[in-house]
Image (cartoon, grey):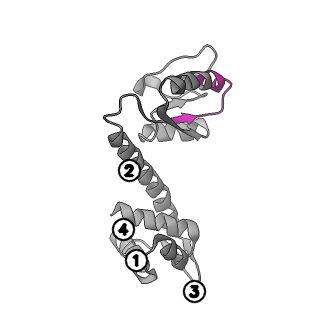
């Protein structure tokens, strides 16, 4: 399974039209169709329901869409990490935040860090605790702010003055 083809698959899944996606990706429609068909053959499952002018995801296609988004996020994160290996005063931090009153403390800290180290780039993911915890489990986040109980035995963490855990 090629990363490039997973990107093509995601674009097609989002757009719902192979011709439009092919034009946007600057490849021919038959080439894109063939690559998506080969992906289906490789996985042994039909990913799209095709009609004359549109495509829709099958249940298997919806599963692959979720996994492909995670895979491509991880590839981007890994690429960014390798680009910043020699950059000790900058880089990317991926942070997950569940809604909480204590985010204001974190925001103040991040502002001070970015003033001192302007080449640090923060990427925030906001959702419920379960979704944030799932992303940190898969290595898509470096840091998380959560408000509900989770198994902390796997993590380094800070306990905040109120009920939140960092």
Is 101 on the left-hand or right-hand side of 4?
right
Residue found at the far top of this picture: 161
Q: Which label sits in the foreground, 2 or 1?
A: 2
Q: Decide which of tag 2 and tag 3 comes sooner along the chain.
A: 3
Q: Is residue 40 above or below residue 140?
A: below
Q: Residue 86 is drawn in which quadrant?
A: top left
Neighbor class of circle 4 (other Cα within 10 Å; few <14, some 14-19, many 20+) is: few
Whether 52 is among the magenta residues is no
Q: Residue at x 58, y 79 (%)?
A: 54
Q: Which mark is residue 75?
A: 2
Residue to which mark 3 is pinned: 52
Residue 35 x/y as whole percent: 38, 75
* Front one among 80 and 158: 80
Please report contact status of discs 2 and 1: CB closer than 8 Å, yes or no: no
Residue to which mark 4 is pinned: 43
Q: Element at badge 1?
A: helix
- Real-space Cα distance between discs 2 and 4? 20 Å
* Front one among 115 and 29: 115
- Real-space Cα distance between discs 2 and 3? 34 Å
Residue to which mark 1 is pinned: 37
Q: Is residue 34 above or below residue 1?
A: below
Q: Element at badge 4?
A: helix
């Amino acid at each position: 399974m090629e990363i490039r083809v997973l990107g093509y698959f995601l674009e097609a899944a989002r757009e719902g039209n192979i011709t439009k996606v092919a034009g946007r990706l600057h490849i021919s429609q038959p080439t894109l169709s063939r690559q998506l068909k080969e992906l289906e053959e490789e996985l042994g499952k039909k990913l799209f329901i095709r009609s004359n002018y549109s495509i829709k995801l099958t249940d298997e296609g919806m599963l692959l869409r979720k996994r492909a988004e995670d895979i491509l996020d991880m590839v981007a994160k890994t690429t960014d990490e390798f680009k910043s290996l020699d950059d000790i005063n900058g880089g990317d931090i991926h942070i997950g935040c569940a809604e909480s009153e204590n985010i204001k403390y974190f925001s103040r800290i991040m502002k001070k860090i970015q003033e001192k180290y302007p080449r640090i780039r923060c990427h925030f993911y906001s959702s419920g605790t379960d979704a944030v915890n799932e992303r940190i489990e898969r290595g898509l986040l470096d840091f998380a702010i959560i408000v509900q109980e989770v198994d902390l035995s796997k993590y380094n963490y800070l306990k905040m003055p109120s009920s939140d855990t960092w």
